[in-house]
Structures are given as C-alpha cells and as structure tokens.
Image (cartoon, rainbow, N blue to C red):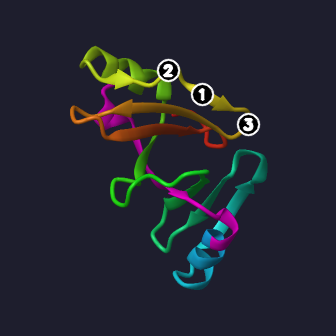
Amino acid sequence: MNLKENFDGGLTCGFNVSDIQKSMKWYQEVLGFELIYYMEELGWCELQSPVDRVNVGLSQVEKMPPPGGNAVMTWGVKDIEAARKDLKRKGVKFDGDIRTIEGMVKLATFYDIDGNCFMLYQDLSLPKK
C-alpha cells in the first residue's frame, strides 16, 4: 500500500506552547475549539477544530522555539507500519521507531528534504482497514 492510499482523512497540527492551561483556554474561548483530551503527565492535549477530523495538539515546552516554524502537521494513516515502510523505501529520514501510547495512538516522526518535521499517526480506537 503506498502512502497516498494509506491516508485516513485525519490531520492534527501540533504546536509548542509555554503554558498549556492558558493555551487550552484560549483555543476553547477564542476559537471555539472543543477539548478532546488532556494528558497532564505528558504536557499534551488535543482540541477539535470546527473542521471534521482536523485537530490542534498543544505540547507544553520549557523553552519556546523562535517564532515561526513551530507547527508539526500530523497525518492520519490506516496502517502506520506500511506508511513508514513506504516512506523509508523512498529515502525519508525518520526520528527513531514508531512510538505507541497503548489503547490510543501510534506515532512516527519524519522529516522533509529541508528538515521540516512531520508526523504520522494511527488512531488505535479505529478498526484497522
């Protein structure tokens, strides 16, 4: 299965934030996003945008990167192992192995030719197609 056939229509765009509580409140009150979940121990939350299956992820960091270039687009796939294998075959560089948050999601971080960071995710609550 090539990557184009593997996309599942979901997209999460992750941002680093200096204060996750303030940011969660801002996204909810100012933009009207709905909190999907908050994992305090990981300093991570996701909010649903008004666009179906397009979410914003917030990651609390100690030091913010310079303005610009902060977003990480995270593409939903049906089979993350197949997607990773397809991209590796095309010479794409990955940052380590696939990470799993049990019962929730599998994640794989990769880079484009300019070093921009992207991720793939497989939602473990959805049936594998």
Sort mark 2 into few (<14), some (14-19) or many (20+) by Cα contacts within 10 Å. few
Element marked by disc 1: strand
Q: Amino acid at mark 3?
A: Gly
Q: Are marks 3 and 1 in contact (CB under 8 Å)?
A: no
What distance separates the C-alpha of mark 1 from that of mark 2?
A: 8 Å
Where is residue 123? Give x, y as percent: 59, 41
Q: Residue furthest top?
A: 89
Say which quadrant the N terminus sits in.
top left
Give the residue pinned by disc 3.
103
Kind of residue at badge 1: Arg
In depth, the one of 109 and 90 nearer the eye is 109
Label 1 vs label 2, nearer the camera: 2
Q: Quadrant of residue 37?
A: bottom right
- Which residue does the numbered mark 2 point to in the structure image? 96
Q: Residues within 10 Å of mark 1 (few under 14, many from 20)?
A: few
- How many callouts does the rendering have? 3
Residue displayed at 29% across by 23% down: 92
Q: Is residue 57 above or below residue 113?
A: below
Residue lying furthest right: 41
Q: CA distance from mark 3 to mark 1?
A: 12 Å
Q: Are marks 1 and 2 in contact (CB under 8 Å)?
A: yes
Regarding mark 2 in the picture, which secondary structure is present there? loop
Residue 128 in percent (x, y) is at 56, 33
Q: Position of residue 48 (x, y in %)?
A: 56, 66
Instruction: Identify the magenta region.
Output: 1-22
Numbered mark located on residue 99 in the image: 1
Mark 3–mark 2 CB contact (< 8 Å):
no
Density class for disc 3 (Cα within 10 Å; few <14, some 14-19, many ≥20) is: few
- Any magenta on residue 26? no
